[in-house]
């Protein structure tokens, strides 16, 4: 009933939290989110557990409503006592925290990079003593701080750190903390509730009445304590107390409002100032109180009346006390309080708070206040606060008279919301704009945001015409904003790649002409657009020089811009058949995204890398990228089980019907590129399994309806399917086309694939020369699957010419490269061919390789290539402690003691 802590009926909850702290004390960090209705005892439980956490260093953080629009406000308060540990972080993480906290100038940091820095600070702080971080009223944290805290909570693994959150589960708050275990506090049981009630009353109460009050309040502890006297002094029946609980929040607010009305007028004014501010900043409230001629002794009387508690900040007995005071006041009194607080904030140099309170004090429109809010929004953007920027600009727009400026603020808020992934908020903001009445630039911006919403929501009605809509947006920007015009056309190309052949409203030729027309504006973007325009419009040999110039221009971009160019890098690299350049460009872009903590950009890049590796790469690298996507999704709080790459599934043995069903589903929502790549992969799997007629039927529609740079990479696959299914004459023009492409681009990858296709379509008298050329050329590329297939086809040809020993040599090499590249779907065909030659596959070297987890293998590979633990931690969005933990396990499994030995072991495994 009542434990040592003095809490009634919370023994099970305290035990669960105690286990969490016990794990943290022993170096196994974790987190938990305590949710429940107002007054249910979240704060009391939090305080009870942290007070009993002996041997821990305790950090306490509270959420404040007035800070909800100040980006990283809570993180700034959290990191102040941790500032001594800043040197333990990488330079980029230090800068991210300082910029986010407003202590330094620099590029706006991504919130996940700030999160990695906070994780590092907590880990460093826990180096000597375990740390428990308790966050109360977490639902009142600013969005950026909340994202950071949730990120850190999800990444705790082998750190002696425990994070406890308490919050009301309002508007799906628990879902926003995705990945953090939840503890839902319900009302006290009947026995504990009646015991608490008896302890709270000055006079005895009969058991029946006590039970009725306990039922009526739902066992809510605050209601039982604060309403006990009020309820017990009336007749139970007169209160209407039945089996259904009373609305606790409303009755408590009325109770507190009545207590405030009993105080003198100056106290009422002072507590209204404190309620209107919510930061608890005593200097600010005192300055505002003096401007209203309230004496300094008023605060003491407010505390005596048990309305507030004075600590390092002003705190109300409960948030319901604050809401009761604020809601019971008239609109005029509230605005007067906000005006006084705005003036005090201005005198104290608190720019964002001044704007926030000035806005609260305003009725109707007020252009000067709206201007100040926009300035505060710009300050938020400089600190990486997109959620705060969206919120502040929305309020600024409400205070702005109708017209261009109001529209600009609304669409700016929508852009910021979209950048945070708040697509519904972005959509609702766009609905407030009269697009027909808007000026051209704002109209174009609306279109761009709407297309972004369609991409996020996978809405085919928005996604399929997105390329056409973005061309329309570019037309609105033309002659007014060249940079926006060019960036919008780059997005149009990306959307065309996404929808693939399902693109509506604009032909590829028209898109190419519009892209080419915008390339006269000068600058790197113009060079990139010129290359993409040539890719679409010009004959291949003419397009290659411009495409190469565009590819090189992307590589000249700063990292912060390059990490958003994944589609263009993949498209141009594939068009040029530059497997090494494409891989290096995408790797650099991904590294830039990791360094910046830009997980959303990294997520997109890893998807692109995974798909790119299936043509001109290896399945193993494609799988590694998808594993990293899963880790990134988990770090962002998403369900990693929803990460699906249908083309990769086809390569790795998923049932054919399942892959095709996913392809159909992707097409249905507008992701035609996903559908087409999956269908092509199934066709290739048919080819690998010797189902040549099926492969021919699957690939022919894709070849007959070519799509940009993608289709030429499928020419050799179709040529093989056609030759083996009795359509050799159809294969010849595609083999010839590959030869022409290779002559224009100079690519070894393209030349090797062309030679392989030529070998299939040539007479036996010249076929061997083409096979030998294919093997020799592809051996010098990173396209290992293509090399393995060249060995396979060469071996098959040699066996048919009765050269079994030579055939065996080629087939053994094919098996080696298929195994090493992860292209297992070709192995049964290769082994069957080897057996038909009367040979057996060579026994694989028994290395006794240990079974490493994906995370262990990733850490091991990075360590073997010379990365330090902090560098690995930064790249994988984990702590240095976690890296050290994984490395120790790897060393134990391999039976080694140094990184040099690790490099040798991994090299042996790859060989």
Image (cartoon, rainbow, N blue to C red):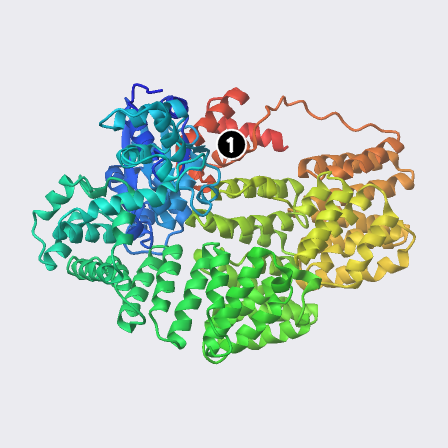
Report the number of numbered marks.
1
Q: Is residue 595 left or right of residue 578?
A: left
Q: Nearer the viewer, residue 579 or 66?
A: 66
Q: What residue is shown at x 27% (from left), y 37% (from top)?
A: 230
Q: What percent of the width, then of the height, locates residue 599?
A: 48, 48
Tell me, yes or no, if residue 27 can be seen here: no
Q: What percent of the width, then of the height, locates residue 78?
A: 28, 41
Tell me, yes or no, if residue 809 can be seen here: yes
Q: Nearer the viewer, residue 155 or 742?
A: 155
Q: Is residue 454 left or right of residue 742?
A: left
Q: 517 above or below 589?
A: below
Q: Nearer the viewer, residue 476 or 479?
A: 476
Work out which quarter of the rendered image holds the C terminus and state it: top right
User: Which residue in the protein does label 1 denote?
Assistant: 860
Q: 314 above or below 864?
A: below
Q: What residue is shown at x 68% (from left), y 50% (from top)?
A: 615
For mark 1, give the secondary structure.
helix
Q: What percent of the width, then of the height, locates residue 752?
A: 73, 52
Please tell me how crowded label 1 is: few (under 14), some (14-19), or many (20+) other residues with Cα within 10 Å: many
- Identify the image quadrant of residue 2: top left
Q: What residue is shown at x 55% (from left), y 51% (from top)?
A: 605
Q: What percent of the width, then of the height, locates residue 614?
A: 67, 47
Q: Nearer the viewer, residue 855 or 817?
A: 855
Work out which quarter of the rendered image holds the N terminus and state it: top left
Q: 159 above or below 763?
A: above
Q: Is residue 439 left or right of residue 806?
A: left
Q: Is residue 693 left or right of residue 244?
A: right
């Amino acid at each position: 009933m009542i434990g040592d802590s003095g809490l009634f009926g919370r023994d099970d909850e305290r035990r669960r939290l105690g286990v969490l702290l016990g794990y943290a004390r022993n170096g196994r960090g974790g987190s938990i989110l305590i949710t429940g209705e107002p007054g249910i005892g979240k704060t009391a439980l939090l305080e009870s557990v942290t007070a009993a956490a002996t041997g821990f260093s305790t950090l306490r953080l509270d959420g404040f409503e007035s800070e909800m629009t100040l980006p990283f406000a809570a993180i700034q308060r959290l990191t102040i006592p941790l500032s001594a540990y800043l040197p333990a972080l990488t330079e980029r993480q230090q800068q991210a925290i300082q910029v986010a906290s407003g202590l330094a100038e620099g590029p706006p940091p991504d919130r996940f990079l700030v999160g990695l820095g906070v994780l590092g600070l907590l880990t460093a702080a826990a180096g000597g003593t375990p740390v428990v971080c308790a966050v109360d009223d977490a639902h009142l944290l600013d969005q950026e701080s909340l994202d950071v805290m949730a990120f850190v909570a999800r990444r705790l693994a082998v750190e002696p750190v425990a994070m406890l959150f308490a919050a009301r589960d309002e508007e799906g708050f628990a879902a926003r903390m995705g990945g953090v275990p939840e503890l839902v506090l319900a009302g006290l049981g009947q026995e504990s509730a009646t015991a608490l009630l008896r302890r709270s009353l000055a006079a005895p109460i009969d058991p029946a009445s006590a039970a009725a009050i306990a039922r009526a309040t739902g066992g809510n502890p605050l209601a039982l304590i604060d309403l006990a006297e009020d309820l017990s002094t009336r007749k139970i029946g007169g209160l209407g107390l039945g089996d259904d609980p009373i609305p606790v929040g409303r009755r408590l607010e009325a109770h507190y409002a009545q207590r405030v009305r009993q105080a003198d007028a100056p106290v009422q004014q002072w507590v209204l100032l404190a309620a209107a501010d919510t930061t608890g900043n005593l200097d600010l409230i005192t300055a505002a109180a003096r401007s209203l001629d309230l004496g300094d002794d008023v605060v003491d009387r407010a505390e005596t009346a048990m309305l507030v508690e004075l600590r390092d900040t002003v705190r109300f007995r409960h948030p319901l006390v604050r809401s009761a005071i604020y809601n019971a006041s008239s609109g005029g009194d509230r605005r007067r309080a906000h005006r006084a607080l705005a003036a005090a904030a201005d005198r104290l140099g608190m720019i964002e708070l001044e704007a926030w309170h000035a806005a609260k004090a305003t009725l109707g429109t007020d252009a000067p206040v709206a201007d100040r809010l926009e300035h505060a929004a710009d300050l938020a953007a400089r600190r990486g606060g997109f959620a705060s920027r969206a919120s502040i600009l929305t309020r600024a727009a409400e205070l702005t008279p109708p017209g261009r400026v109001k529209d600009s603020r609304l669409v700016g808020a929508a852009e910021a919301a979209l950048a945070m992934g708040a697509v519904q908020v972005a959509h609702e903001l766009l609905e407030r704009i009269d697009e027909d009445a808007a000026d051209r630039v704002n109209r174009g911006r609306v279109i761009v945001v709407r297309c972004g919403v369609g991409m996020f929501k996978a809405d085919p009605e928005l996604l399929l015409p997105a390329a056409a809509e973005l061309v329309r947006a570019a037309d609105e920007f033309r002659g007014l904003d060249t940079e926006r015009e060019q960036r919008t056309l780059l997005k149009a190309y990306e959307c065309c790649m996404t929808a693939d052949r399902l693109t509506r409203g604009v032909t590829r030729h028209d898109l190419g002409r519009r892209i080419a027309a915008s390339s006269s504006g000068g600058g790197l973007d113009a060079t990139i657009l010129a290359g993409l325009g040539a890719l679409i419009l010009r004959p291949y040999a003419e397009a290659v020089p411009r495409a190469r110039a565009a590819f090189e221009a992307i590589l000249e971009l700063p990292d912060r811009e390059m990490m958003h160019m994944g589609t263009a890098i993949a498209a141009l690299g594939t068009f040029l058949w530059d497997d090494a350049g494409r891989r290096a460009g995408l790797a650099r872009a991904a590294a830039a995204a990791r360094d910046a903590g830009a997980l959303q950009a990294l997520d997109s890049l890893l998807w692109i890398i995974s798909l790119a590796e299936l043509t001109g790469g290896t399945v193993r690298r494609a799988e590694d990228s998808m594993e990293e996507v899963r880790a990134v999704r988990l770090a962002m709080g998403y369900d990693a089980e929803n990460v699906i790459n249908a083309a990769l599934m086809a390569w790795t043995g998923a049932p054919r019907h399942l892959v095709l069903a996913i392809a159909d589903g992707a097409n249905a929502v507008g992701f035609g590129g996903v559908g087409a790549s999956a269908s092509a992969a199934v066709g290739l799997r048919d080819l690998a399994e010797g189902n040549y007629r099926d492969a021919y039927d699957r690939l022919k529609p894709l070849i007959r309806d070519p799509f940009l740079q993608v289709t030429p990479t499928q020419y050799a696959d179709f040529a093989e399917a056609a030759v083996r299914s009795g359509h050799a004459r159809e294969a010849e023009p595609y083999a010839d086309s590959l030869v022409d492409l290779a002559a224009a681009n100079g690519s070894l990858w393209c030349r090797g694939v062309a030679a392989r296709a030529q070998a299939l379509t040539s007479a036996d008298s010249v076929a061997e020369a083409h096979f030998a050329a294919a093997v020799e050329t592809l051996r010098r590329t990173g396209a290992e699957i293509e090399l393995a297939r060249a060995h396979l086809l060469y071996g098959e040809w040699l066996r048919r010419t009765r050269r079994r020993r030579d055939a065996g040599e080629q087939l053994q090499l094919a098996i080696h490269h298929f195994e090493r590249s992860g292209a297992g779907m070709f192995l049964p065909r290769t082994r069957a061919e080897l057996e038909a030659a009367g040979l057996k596959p060579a026994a694989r070297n028994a290395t006794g390789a240990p079974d490493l987890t994906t995370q262990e293998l990733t850490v091991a590979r990075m360590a073997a290539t010379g990365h330090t633990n902090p560098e690995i931690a930064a790249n994988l969005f984990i702590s240095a402690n976690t890296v050290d933990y994984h490395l120790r396990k790897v060393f134990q499994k391999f039976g080694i003691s140094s990184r040099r030995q690790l490099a040798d072991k991994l090299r042996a495994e790859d060989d």
